[in-house]
Amino acid sequence: MGRRGRKAWIWFYRSLFLRDRPLTVKLLVYSAMLVVIPLMVVGMISFQKSSEVLREEANLSNRQIIEQVKLHIEYYIRDFEIDSIRMQNHPSMQQFLRMTSVQEVERSGIREPMMQLLGDTAYSRSDISRIMLIMENQTVLDTSMNKNVTPALQLIKEPWFQSVPPNSDIMLTIRPPSVRYELEAMPVLSIVKRLVSPNTLEPVATLIMEVNFKRIQEIADRVTIGRTGYLSILDPQGKYIYSPEYSEIGHLAPWEKLKWILQQDSGSYQSQSGDKPFYTFSRSAYLNWRLVTTVPEHELMRGTTFIRQTIWWTVIITLVIAYLIGIGFAASIVRPVRALQFFMKRVKEGDFHARADIESKDEIGQLTNDFNKMVDKLQVLLDEIYVSQLRETDLQLRQKETELKVLQSQVNPHFLMNALETVRGMALEKDMSDISDLVASLGRLLRYNLNHAGATISLRDEILICDLYLRIQKYRFEEKLTYEFHIPSWAEDQPIAKFVLQPLVENCVIHGIETSAQPVHIDISVKRQGKHQYVVELKDSGVGISRSRLSELQTDLHQKDMLTADSHIGIVNVHRRIAYLFGEAYGIELESEAGIGTLVRIKLPLSIQIEKGA
């Protein structure tokens, strides 16, 4: 998580828990939340569940109503189908269907018996308005004497006439009254059926029975769907066969999911437009009609409205009571806290004679008592602590100065220089070049320490001294010691603490070669680490360091004081000098494993000038 993300999280945490608000506000807000949130959650769940239950109950009730209406209408239409079958099987009808021309019909005298048959059937039921028989050869028998009705031969020109099934199945159709009857406002339901010739078994006539719409209306009007719900009947194309509004009959239903309803046998859904009515529908397999109940949402949700109002009043009343109790509770807590805050402010301003009154034995009372005792002790110890801090600061400054002097004095062996020069001269007189080179290297090593008075030098000079030391050890250990330097050019002028590498290399020689018969290889390399730091790595293949000893060394690097450290130059010496010169972020890191070797990392600051030029 970045700095920006951390700041955003802190801001959110402080805002959520009102960290910067008064204690009174916190108590009132959280007490309200403890009341409102549970009640709102319970209310929402109750409202949701009750809405689902009401929809399920409305759906089940409406399905039962639809099935009852569907049975009534199906039985009603079946009666007419039975009448049509009875007429079709009458001897006069059979004789009529065998005739093939108008002349044959006129000569046979069959018209009068046929009119008698149709008239008797029409008169037998008061809800039959008209019966027509249309021959394919235009012969028409019509029981209606009303000249205002639509002529029978005009009906065959209408689109629905061509869709009458040819297999003697009935077809039901209905049209607006303005098309059928000019004097009546009531629509008429037509039951249409093809009649086949007994001789050819081909359709030769069409029987049309027009039924008064009042019966369908009576069946539908008996249905009670809540207070404002209603029943509609649709044909296979989605047009109204029945609707409480007569003006809609014969027109397409304006429902958003009409196409989906026409594809389903039964189901229900709630519209998302207008007043969001709830629809339940079922298809009559016999009539191929769909009966649909419509219930407005406000009626469907009448019970949930009561639940919602109850929840809101409960929340308001409970919240008022909670606030009244919360105000008293907050006052009992905040008042002594504010009093304690007042006395703390006086102490902060230097008045150590102020004491807070203890009014209770609870946590706040105990806190007040502890505050008073603390002020007593502060008054007694203030002068002593102040003087002690001044002395401690002065002591720390002196201690650091002394440590730097000790570190410097540990690497200044002046008295050896003259002795080494004498030994080198004697070696040259005896023509002992190896001894001369060895003594010369040792002299240069000591002269380096004497001539460089500063605390830091370039890495190039430090590598040179390290190389002199390894050359001296090479004379001693010969093939048991090998070493390599990998120093990039950009690193040669980088700053480093004086006499850092030689003590570390000496540790590699002492603990790696002198204690083991195996040869040891030392590798010294430099690499960058980030934009402002570089690392010198010393890696040897010696005996390594045990886990317990490594833990002790790492602890010493961070805790051991140089004034109490050993007098020899070691890892702690080097680490402390680097930390004093460059800061606590720099110093030595150790990695080692017994039997494998040791890796020493020296972290140092990277020179900005060198970095830009590299």
Image (cartoon, rainbow, N blue to C red):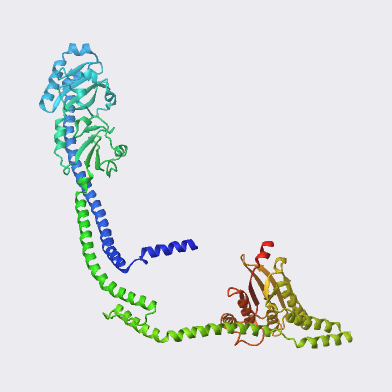
Q: Left or right: where does residue 477 sit relative to residue 129?
A: right
Q: How many marks?
A: 0
> At which x and y percent is residue 437?
82, 81
- Compared with 153, 516 (above or below) is below
Name the residue nearer the viewer: 524 or 73: 524
Which image quarter holds the C terminus?
bottom right
> At which x and y percent is residue 545?
63, 81
**Which image quadrant is residue 511 in?**
bottom right
Q: Is residue 591 visible?
A: no
**Which image quadrant is residue 14 in?**
bottom left
Q: Determine the residue positioned at 62% across, 64% down.
A: 531
Name the residue nearer the viewer: 571 or 497: 497
Q: Determine the residue positioned at 23% across, 52% down.
A: 53
- Compared with 50, 422 (above or below) is below
Name the residue nearer the viewer: 187 or 310: 310
Q: Left or right: where does residue 368 sit relative to residue 506?
A: left
- Compared with 184, 605 (above or below) is below
> At which x and y percent is residue 225?
17, 42
> At which x and y percent is residue 400?
59, 82
Q: Is residue 222 visible?
A: yes
**Which image quadrant is residue 432 in?**
bottom right
Name the residue nearer the viewer: 426 or 195: 426
